[in-house]
Image (cartoon, helix red, strand yellow):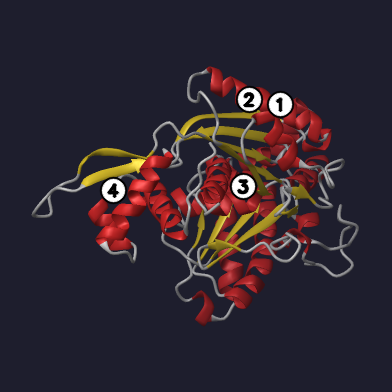
Amino acid sequence: MTARPANTHQARLLHLLRDGGPNSRAQLGDQVDLSRSKLAVEVDRLLDTGLVVADGLAASRGGRRSHNIRLAPTLRFLGVDIGATSVDVAVTNAELEVFGHLTQPMDVREGPVAVFEQVLAMAAKLRDSGVADALDGAGIGVPGPVRFPEGIPVAPPIMPGWDGFPVREALSQELGCPVMVDNDVNLMAMGEQHAGVARSVQDFLCVKIGTGIGCGIVVGGQVYRGTTGSAGDIGHIQVEPEGRPCACGNRGCLEAYFGGSALARDAEAAAVNGQSPELAAILESAGRLAASDVASAAAAGDPAALDLIRAGGARTGQVIAGLVSFFNPGLVVIGGGVTGLGHTLLASIRTQVYRQSLPLATGNLPIVLGELGSAAGVIGAARLISDHLFSPA
């Protein structure tokens, strides 16, 4: 797709149609500060670009009936969410409805070439299934800091071989369309903002607890990335002075105590030390433990597994409490793979935050699980590329 909106009025109309679906000229006119004649000019120019199409007559509001318009139904975006241990790829329309979604295990430490071979194979499979003839743009999430303007990962702790890799440029060439790249937790926040639990919230935190722990920060409806793209790297906030060594080189970081990797390690220790017959049985049959095994053991009432979840939730809550006191968000969303631990984890986080932060900050503060699960990242990725393509050239 080569067309882009020519000005901020057209960009605003495209965003309204993306977020609200098909609408009449009259109702769009109510939402943008344009006279009827000026609105008609901008809509006609958008119709000429092919970005929007006429969509029948709107319901009558008295007088002549207005025409509905909608984003072109042929537009297709690719959303790619690369995690530490899996890859999600989806195709959406311009209103960010998911038409096809694939998930496969993948170790991000295999490096960008191997990971992108798999991403391209998954994208090809989706296109072959008939959900997209061509792609108009792609959004990519990676589990580490990103220099956003260039779409390049910067010193990501759990991504050896990715530092400085030109993700945006390389994938744009392979896919033949514009590409935008961001940190995976920022995209999770954008997904929940578009179609999930944060739909009506302008200022919120989205905490992703997966292999590691990160936080998407949304201020005034926009993701805040920081000067170098590393805003929200809360997994490396210290929770224990001179504590456990962390993969980042420091000691006592939150990630050294909680997140998928730390939880699996502590679960194996509990199994080997005889603290948990349930985990010991899983370890014996599988040869290793994952965070999902802790969830299974906790669901069966295993005290050691429940203790691990509560302790991890308390440490995570300790960090979130500091963020809440500093940022005063309207909502905290908890997402990521470890949310399979469910309400035991959520209760532990809530208890710590409500106990530690001032009542003024927490009095009306919901702390909730994300609604979208593994779709949050790919919807956020599609939103990222649509934000780019629906902004003035």
Helix, strand or loop at mark 4: strand
Looking at the image, residue 140 lies above or below residue 243: above
Helix, strand or loop at mark 2: helix
Helix, strand or loop at mark 1: helix
**What amino acid type is highlighted by mark number 2?**
Met
Whole-angstrom CA distance, mark 3 to mark 1, is 21 Å
Residue placed at 87% from the left, 40% from the top? Answer: 161
Residue occupying the far top of the picture: 128
Residue placed at 31% from the left, 44% from the top? Answer: 22
Residue at mark 3? 336
Residue at mark 1? 118
**What amino acid type is highlighted by mark number 1?**
Gln
Q: Residue 131: in sight, yes or no?
A: yes
**What amino acid type is highlighted by mark number 3?**
Gly
- Spot occupied by residue 280 in the image (x, y as percentages of width and height): 75, 36
Q: Closer to the camera: disc 2 or disc 3?
A: 2
- Spot occupied by residue 234 in the image (x, y as percentages of width and height): 72, 62
**369 and 46: which one is in front?**
46
Q: Closer to the camera: disc 2 or disc 4?
A: 4
Q: In this view, does 247 lie to the left or right of 350?
A: right
Whole-angstrom CA distance, mark 2 to mark 3, is 21 Å
**326 and 175: which one is in front?**
175
Q: Is residue 369 left or right of residue 139?
A: left
Tell whether label 4 touches label 1 (CB within 8 Å).
Answer: no
- Nearer-N-terminus badge (1/4): 4
Residue placed at 39% from the left, 33% from the top? Answer: 73
- Spot occupied by residue 204 in the image (x, y as percentages of width and height): 53, 65
Residue at mark 2? 122
Residue at mark 4? 23
Mark 3, residues whose alpha carbon is within 10 Å: few (<14), some, or many (≥20)?
many
**What amino acid type is highlighted by mark number 4?**
Asn
